[in-house]
Image (cartoon, rainbow, N blue to C red):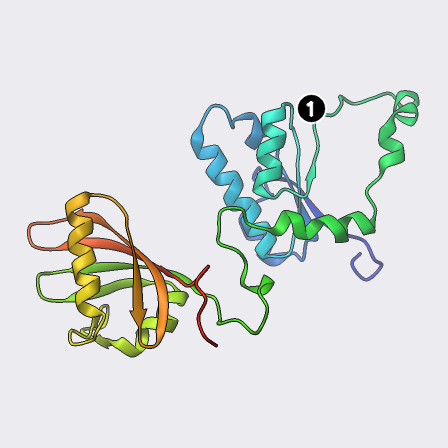
Amino acid sequence: MHRKGYSIWMDDFGTGQSALYSLSDIPFSGIKLDQSFFRKLEESSRQGIIIQTIVELSHKMGFLMIAEGIESADGCRYAQNWGVNFIQGYYFSKPLPLQDLLESPFVHRLTGRRDVLLYRPAANILLFRPMERSFYSKEREPLLFGKAVLEWNGRQILFLRMSEGIQEVMMPYLREVDMNNKELIPDLPFFQPLYERMQQADGVKDVVDFPLQIGQKHFHAQITLLTRGQEDAIYVFALTNYGIENPV
């Protein structure tokens, strides 16, 4: 069917045989999100999290997505903001007899390939992430956004978890403690400023924003206390150069 030029879509995704494992086995062009997801949206906040995750997954795998069963303006707005490509439901119209359908404006507003090419990128933009790197001119310093989970045990700043962005910057300044943890080298120039901000975050119980110079590069950093034990404390650390002009 693909060789003949047809697009293959999965119907009623999330129910019955239309499960996640099918996405890895069959080269679909798109998925149709079952209407039960949006019908339960007002009943549970979990439902919105599930829908957003499915939409993001579909974009990463190169699928288009239809949300079916949209019956309200709120449902339509959520679907748009979460990046659904096509929206179907009673919000626009109930099923029509053929003659009424032919006389309606729907027949004269069919979606063509031009519309898909124009609007698909608009749906793929993630509204809950920083500006995409690919939009910036190549002359600028490579953009970075990363997060890490840090531990202060009274002696060391340990990096328990790191995103790729943090690893790009921090790896030259870390040394391995054991198989699972890496320690920030204590005699670095930025060790003391980072430690002081950790203590500040511990006191204010809020996110602390501060400039941080690492090597020759300048960043905007954030840190906040996550959990505290008797001797240890866990922090969330974010680092970015978005909005900061760095020399190239």
Residue 35 seen: no
Q: Tell me where residue 238 appears, x and y as whole percent.
A: 34, 57
Tell me: 28 left or right of 125.
right
Amino acid, disc 1: Tyr
When asked about the image quadrant of residue 69, the answer is: top right
Q: Is residue 166 left or right of residue 247?
A: left
Location of residue 103 in the rendering, given as x and y in whole percent from the top left corner: 92, 24
From the top left corner, tell me how far across and down residue 212 is, in percent. Answer: 30, 65
Instruction: Identify the residue position indicated by label 1 in the image.
Output: 91
Residue at left offset 11%, top offset 60%: 153
- Residue 210 lies in what quarter of the image? bottom left
Name the residue nearer the viewer: 144 or 137.
137
Pick whichever, 208 or 134, lies toward us. Answer: 208
SS at circle 1: loop
The foreground one among 245 and 84 is 245
Q: Quadrant of the N terminus?
A: bottom right
Tell me residue 91's x, y (percent). Answer: 69, 24
Residue under the image location 68 percent in, 43 percent down? 85
Q: Is residue 217 above or below residue 46?
A: below
Foreground of the two, 8 or 129: 129
The image shows residue 141, relative to residue 220, as above or below, that is below
Decide if residue 179 is in sight here.
yes
Residue for point 60% across, 52% down: 59
User: Could you tell whether 66 is left or right of 238 in the image?
Assistant: right
Neighbourhood count class around disc 1 (C-alpha, 10 Å): few under 14, some 14–19, many 20 upward: some
Q: Is residue 195 above or below residue 37?
A: below
